[in-house]
Image: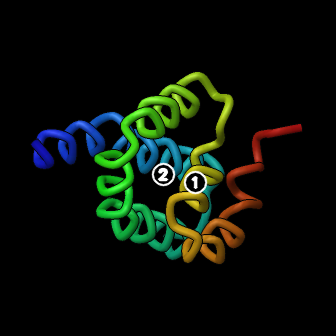
Amino acid sequence: MQDLIATLVSLFLIGPLETELADKLAAARAPRAVAIEIAACAREAAPRVVDRAVSDPWWAVSSTVQVWIGTTRPEALLVTIAPGCERAVQSAKPFLNAGEA
């Protein structure tokens, strides 16, 4: 059962989170090192996300929906999931916010 949940969390939460962040960083022409650091943090956070999703499925569903509909920014969710990624997110923030007025 945990393997199924891990697959679903990866497919519907972690994958889209990584993709959205990578797309934003690429569009803003962020340095490759910044994009690599963000991607590494997201991958390192994956086991914690799965553990949390197993123990709190409502959190997983609501987090996925919030990112999909735009009420939660992917980088904010990443920091919530993996507080150790805050430094990486801070270095990426100028690029993630580049398209906003």
Residue 7: which quarter of the image? Answer: top left
Residue 50, x across and y down, in percent: 30, 53
Q: Which residue is rendered at x = 34% and y = 49% of the image? A: 55
Q: Give the number of callouts.
A: 2
What amino acid is found at the position of numbered circle 1 in the picture?
A: Leu
Residue sticking out furthest to the right: 101
Residue 44, x across and y down, in percent: 36, 70
Depth check: give the residue in front, 81 or 14: 81
Residue sticking out furthest to the front: 55
Residue 83, x across and y down, in percent: 58, 70
Depth check: give the residue in front, 5 or 89: 5
Q: Is 26 left or right of 44, judged from the image as shown?
A: right
Residues at marks 1 and 2, CA–CA distance in whole angstroms: 5 Å
Q: Which residue is rendered at x = 58% and y = 30% of the image? A: 66
Residue 4, x across and y down, in percent: 13, 40
What amino acid is found at the position of numbered circle 2 in the picture?
A: Ala
Q: Secondary structure at mark 2?
A: helix
Q: Which residue is rendered at x = 61% and y = 53% of the image? A: 75
Q: Are marks 1 and 2 in contact (CB under 8 Å)?
A: yes
Q: Say which residue label 1 marks.
A: 25
Q: Secondary structure at mark 1?
A: helix
Badge number at residue 22: 2
Crowding at label 2, few (<14), some or many (≥20) Cα neighbours within 10 Å?
Answer: some
Q: Quadrant of the N terminus?
A: top left
Task: Identify whether 67 is placed above or below 17.
Answer: above
Badge number at residue 57: none
Q: Is 24 left or right of 100, judged from the image as shown?
A: left
